Image (tube, rainbow, N blue to C red):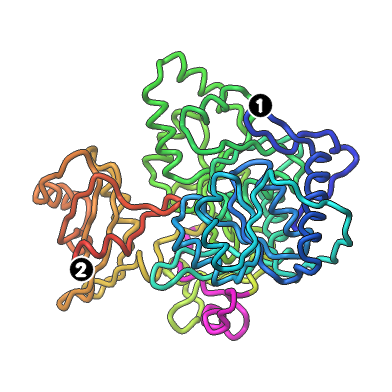
Amino acid sequence: MSSHSTTAAQTNKVAIEEGSQKWTYQELDDAVLSMTHALLNKTQNYKGKCIAYMINPGFEYVQTQRSIWKSGAIAVPLCLSHPLPSLQYVLEDTQAKLIIVSPQYQTILDEYCKASNIDLWVLGESQNTTPATLPTVDADDPALILYTSGTTSKPKGVVLTHGNLNAQMNKLIQAWEWKSSDHTLCVLPLHHVHGIVNVVGCSLQAGATCEFLSEFSAEKTMDLFLKGNINVFMAVPTIYHKLIAYWETLSESKKQELKIAMEKFRLMVCGSAALPATIMNKWKEISGHTLLERYGMTEIGMGISNPYHGDRKTGFVGQPLPGVSIRLVDENFDNVPESEPGEILVKGDNVFKAYWNKPGETSKVFTADGWFKTGDVAVVENGYYKIIGRNSVDIIKSGGYKLSALEIEEVIRMHQEIKDCAVLGIPDEEWGEQVVLVYASEKELDSQNLKTWLKTLLPAYKIPKQYKWLKELPRNAMGKVVKPDLKKLFN
């Protein structure tokens, strides 16, 4: 089952920290058991049923998730910042009959739950914890449903089994050498695989300590770094960007103090969106660490990673993780020759079971012989994989060329006044797709000057034909730019 069984040595080891509060593994186990009994006193048989939860990051989040698993149910984490219509979509899709919430979310769901005959359990209310018979939970049983951000259609529920989650965690524990002496900090949202599996799941499966910040703040994060307990940190590019911006406001002595603290870290990881080389290089300068980039998605957890020991290559996501098989294929699903781009196919015990109640969608994403089609395009150079884009969003077919939007973006980010950018392909009669640019900067820049500057760096067919300026680019919870929203600017 996807939860850690406490060994005698760990009984008094701190599992979770949150502000000034600490809980040992024994206290976590006891709290989970008590809550599981309370759940089973509500409904004896949760096997295969969904329980949704909207709980702040920290001890209660972990307790709730594990209690749901122990009761035999499927855990459905809700996004804390979503408005009711988005939550409603997930609740109706999963047919959840119970929602567990932190008190502050009660008002969002109260009326809806009454009208829909859904049981709302607000944490802190007294519950009946009379011991109940615990069900048997098998590796093949569904454990978690995570919703993928639907770029073209409604989000799909990705069903991960207990076996999938254990495989995902064990592969990372092996590859990134997690130990019980590790201490990590979770600043990532907990309705995504990155936070749930890579940070919380791996740390607790390894018997390490997981500390939580209720919400991300660059200042609080850096303050915690200075305390000297944390030695493993994982984040997305936007978080590293914010940490760098905050670091730049500090005095020289404070900067030096932070550098000394960060150099002692064992591991720093970045993922969920492409890491600009500018951030990679700046972070190395201020922390002494080459960020470990990796590649994954909701359906597979992590599949490819730069090495823990050895060369971490900027712009590359590394090599397949232990026990994960990867192929790069063309449109006919034939393997592509070395250094040619191809779609990533994945096989392994980490790969998800199905999309929730969507057999048609599920069969579309698997080949006849069981390979999962990621929709991501990569190229291999000297054994290292480099993501060049997403079939649908980042590969632009213009004038007979297949262009990587990510590659063009990397060049544009070198411009001193551009904070961020997104390169898109929009339908065009002459070119098939026309390359266009949306950029974020303090003020609008002269398009002609931008074009002239780009001519010194890129071939003509890669230079955007149209330019749009925004103060900030729209992003989802994981820091990925929402490109479909940007395409609407060019209609």
Residues in magenta, as a range: 354-381
Residue plotted at (26% across, 64% down): 487
Neighbor class of circle 1 (other Cα within 10 Å; few <14, some 14-19, many 20+) is: few
User: In this image, 377 relative to 357: left or right?
Assistant: left
Whether tag 2 and tag 1 are in contact, CB under 8 A, the answer is no
* Residue 441 vertical position relative to residue 50 in the rendered view, above or below: above
Residue type at the position of mark 2 = Gln
Circle 2 sits in a helix, a strand or a loop, which is it? strand
Q: Quadrant of residue 319?
A: bottom right
Task: Please tell me the numbered disc located at residue 434.
Answer: 2
The picture places residue 452, in percent across and down from the top left corner, at 12, 49
Q: Is residue 163 magenta?
A: no
* Residue 18 vertical position relative to residue 327 in the rendered view, above or below: above
User: In this image, 148 relative to 68: left or right?
Assistant: left
Question: Which is nearer the N-term, disc 2 or disc 1?
Answer: 1
Query: Is residue 40 visible to the viewer in this orientation of the structure?
Result: yes
Residue plotted at (47% across, 27% down): 219
Neighbor class of circle 2 (other Cα within 10 Å; few <14, some 14-19, many 20+) is: many
Per the image, the residue denoted by label 1 is 20
The picture places residue 400, in percent across and down from the top left corner, at 25, 75
The picture places residue 470, in percent across and down from the top left corner, at 22, 49
Between disc 2 and disc 1, the foreground one is: 1
Residue type at the position of mark 1 = Ser
Circle 1 sits in a helix, a strand or a loop, which is it? loop
Q: Quadrant of residue 417?
A: top left
Given residues 475 and 411, the one toward you in this image is: 475
The picture places residue 429, in percent across and down from the top left corner, at 16, 78
User: In this image, 423 relative to 303: left or right?
Assistant: left
